[in-house]
Image: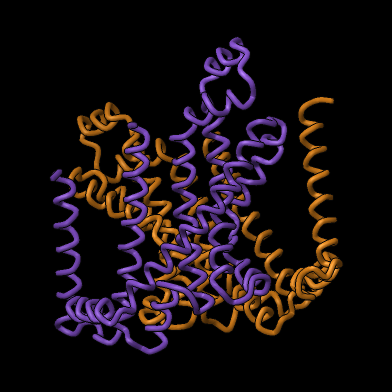
Amino acid sequence: MRTSTLLSFAGIFVAVSAWHATVAPGWVSGYIVPPPLEVWLEGVKLVRDGSILPAFLLTLSQTMAAIAIAGAFGIVCGWILYRHRILGLAYETWLGALFSAPLILFYPILMVVFGRNPSAIVAMGALASLVPVILQTRAGLLGVRPVLLSVARSFNASEAQVARKLLIPAALPTLFTGLRPGLIYAMINVVAMAYLANFGGLGFLVGELYDRFDIPGMYAAALFTIVMSAMVFWGAERLEVWIQKT
Amino acid sequence: MSQSARINLIRAITLVGLWLAWEGLARSGLLYRGVVPSNFSVLAAAWKLLTDPAFYPHVLRTSQEVGVGFVIGAFFGLALPLLIGRIRLVGGVVDNYVQVLAPTPKIVFLPVLLVLFGVDAGSKIAMGAASAFFPVAVETFAALRQVNPVLVNVARSFNATLWQSITKLDLPSMAQPVLSGMRLGLGVAIVGVLLAEIKLSNRGLGFLTINFYNAFHIPDMYAVLLIVFVFAAVANALISWLSRALSKG
C-alpha cells in the first residue's frame, strides 16, 4: 500500500477521533452532533433492517439508466456536432452555458410531465448528464489525429469504415472520459431529486430520517451516501484506466 | 457567406425553431394542459414579477445567501490548499480527500446543515459555502502543483516568509485556474442555495419556484426559473470578465 493511501486512512481515524473528542465532553449538544459510535451503531441498524441497501441499489440503478440514456443521445449528438463542424461551432458556447446552468431546478416540471414516479428521476439524471457527454464526445472526436484521417481518406475508406475502423477505436477512451463526468452529474441529480421530491432511494432515506428526527441515523445515511458515491466514481475511474490500457 | 455569418444564421434559426416548437407543444394539447404554457404567458408572468415590488426581497435574500456562502466557501477553498499544500505529505492527503469528496452529492448533508445552522438563512449559506468550497479547493490544489519549482526554490533561498510566498509567488501564478474554479464554485453555490430554499424556507427564489409549483401556477414558475437562469448567467459573465481583466493586468 502506498504511503499516501495509508496516510489517508490515518487521516480518517484522526478526524473521527477529533469528532469524538469534541462531542464527548458535551461541547456540542449530542442531539445536534451525535458521537461517532452512535452514528456507526445506527448505520449498522439501517443496514440490518434492510432500509439502506435497497435504497442504494435503487439510486444506483436509476443513475445507470440515466447515464445509459444520456450516453446514447449524447454520443450521437456529439458525433453530429463533430461531423458538421459549423454546428459544433454554433452550439459549443451554448452547451457550455447549459453545462453550468442549474438544470436541477427543472425537477418540478419533470414531475408534472412524467408523474411522480421513478421515470421522472431517471429523466432528471439523463437531462443533467447529457450536456457533459455531448461536449466530451465532441472533444474526444476532435482529438483524433488528423493524419489518421488523411490515411483513411487516401485509402478511399467509406464514411462507415472511417467510423468503425478509426474514429470509434481512437475516440473510445475519450468517450469513456465523457461518460464519467456524465455519471457524476447523473448521480448527483438522481440523489438530489430523490431528496427534494421525497421519493426514490438514498436521497429520500436521508430526508425521511430527518423528518423522523432520527439524527444519528440521518448522519449515518448521509455519510453512507457520500462513501458509496465516492466508491462508484472510483470504480468508474479504475474501469476507465483499465479500458485505456487494453 | 462567411463562417461567422453562417454560425449566426444557425443560431438564429435554432432560436426561432425552439420558440416555435415550444409554442406548438403548448398549443398541441399533447401534454397535460398547463405543463408547457405558451411563451407569451411566461413572458407576461415574468413581466408581472419584475414589476412587483414584493418580488425583490426574494431576489435580495437569495443573492445574500449565495454571496455570503460563496465568499466563505471560496475563502476556505483557497486558504486550505495554500496553507496545507506546502506541507507535502499532509497536503497530499487533504488533496486526496478533496478530490474524492468533490463529485459526491452534497445535498444529502442539507438535513445535517439544517440541524447545525437552523432552518433560516444559516443553513442556506452553509449549503452554498459547502458547494463552493470543493471546485475552488480542487482547482487550487491542482494549480499549486503547477507552480514552477524553480521559483519556489528561489523564494526559499531568499528566505521569503509564508505571507510573501503566498502573495508574491503562489497567487499570481495560480490566478487563472483559481478563477475558473471560482466560476464553477459560484455556479454550484447558486444551485446549492436554491435547492436548500426549495426544500425548506419561506423566502428566496427557490421558495418562490416551489411555491408556484405547489399552487400549480406553472407560467409563474417558468418565469422565476427564467429569471434565475439569467441571474446565473450574469454572475458567470461577471467572473469571466474579472478573470480576463486580471489576466491582462
The quarter in which the N terminus of chain B is drawn is top right
Q: Residue shown at 31%/49% (left/top)?
A: B81
Chain corresponding to purple in the figure:
A
Farthest bottom residue in view? A212
Depth check, front residue: A226 or B27: B27
Depth check, front residue: B116 or B67: B116
Colouring: by chain
Establish if A235 lies above or below A214. Answer: above
User: In the rendered image, which quarter is residue A167 located in?
Assistant: top right
Q: Residue shown at 79%/37% (left/top)?
A: B8
Q: How many marks?
A: 0
Q: Position of residue B71 (x, y in %)?
A: 46, 60
Establish if A8 lies above or below B54. Answer: above
Q: Position of residue B162 (x, y in %)?
A: 25, 44
Q: Residue shown at 63%/66% (left/top)?
A: A106
Depth check, front residue: B181 or A135: A135
Horizontal placement of B58 versus A202: left or right? right
Q: Position of residue B45 (x, y in %)?
A: 80, 73
User: In the rendered image, which quarter is residue B87 located in?
Assistant: top left
Q: Is residue B167 visible?
A: no
Q: Is residue B176 visible?
A: yes
Q: Position of residue B12 (x, y in %)?
A: 82, 44
Horizontal placement of A22 versus A181: left or right? left
Depth check, front residue: B115 or A199: A199
Establish if A149 lies above or below B196. Answer: above
Chain corresponding to orange in the figure:
B
